[in-house]
Image (spheres, rainbow, N blue to C red):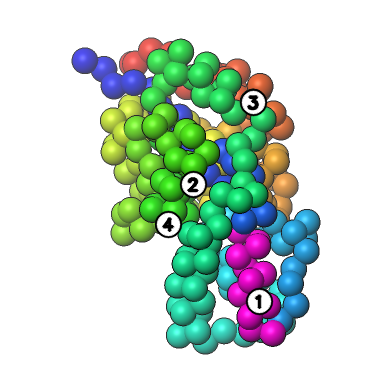
Amino acid sequence: MSLPPIAVFDLDGTLAETAGDLIGTLNALLTREGLPELPLAEARDLIGAGAKALIARGFAVAGATLTPERHDQLFLDFIAHYGRHICEKSYLYPGLIEALDRLEAEGFRLAVCTNKVEGLAVDLLEKLGIAGRFAAICGRETFPFHKPDPRHITQTIARAGGDPARAVMVGDSRADIDAAKAAGVPVVAVTFGYTDTPVDQLGPDRVISDFAELVGAVEALVPRKAA
């Protein structure tokens, strides 16, 4: 019996707009440390490589340097605060549900591969009402490696029981695109997520600006039948 094709999604900036809660947590830490808050519009593109990277980037922008020990403590503080405020301002992108419905109707299995801590990813997706749609939700620490390491994607595909020869990655950042390319998996990049470089300059196979375009992009990249 052949394995089903699979669509693997990043979470922050791909499935959901989460910047309000993430930057809100970052600003709570900055305020506590006596540093200026960062405007959301300017800070959203600091997101994309996980909470530790967001903290490092945010504190650097605010003009502060961190020792490794202080960085580790701030990470724990970030996770605790964010976990309490994880879905106050976050929401699914328009057209996502319809796109997922269409992919499932075409026989695709769905999975999430995110640099968010796994427990937080599951919690957020549950609160957004879509956790049950995914055969696997794999976070930063699910495996001993994470994006841009390609094994984060290939192991997510394996955990979800999908066909790696008929897989596609959908993401919004350099980490997503680099990991997919290294894994030999075609990648669709969305323009509405979090990136400091326009995604069309990062070498994805397709770029979409609306989830209404997703199924067409996926069908152009993924074989409809197993080889």
Q: Amino acid at mark 2?
A: Leu
Residue 151, how many percent across, how many down?
36, 48
Q: Which mark is residue 117?
A: 4
How far is disc 3 from disc 2 in space, using C-alphas? Answer: 18 Å
Decide which of tag 4 and tag 2 comes sooner along the chain.
Answer: 4
How far is disc 4 from disc 2 in space, using C-alphas? Answer: 11 Å
Q: Report the span colored magenta.
A: 22-34
Q: The N terminus appears in which quarter of the rendering?
A: top left
Q: Say which element carries label 4.
A: loop
Marks 3, 2: nearer the viewer: 2
Magenta part, dominant SS: helix
How far is disc 4 from disc 1 in space, using C-alphas? Answer: 21 Å
Q: Which of 225/79 is in front?
A: 79
Image vertical order of residue 225 relative to residue 170, above or below: above
Q: Find disc 2 in the rendering and name its residue.
A: 124
Q: Which mark is residue 95?
A: 3
Marks 4, 1: nearer the viewer: 1
Q: The C terminus appears in which quarter of the rendering?
A: top left
Q: Is residue 77 left or right of residue 210?
A: left
Q: Residues within 10 Å of mark 4 (few under 14, many from 20)?
A: some
Image vertical order of residue 97 relative to residue 194, above or below: above
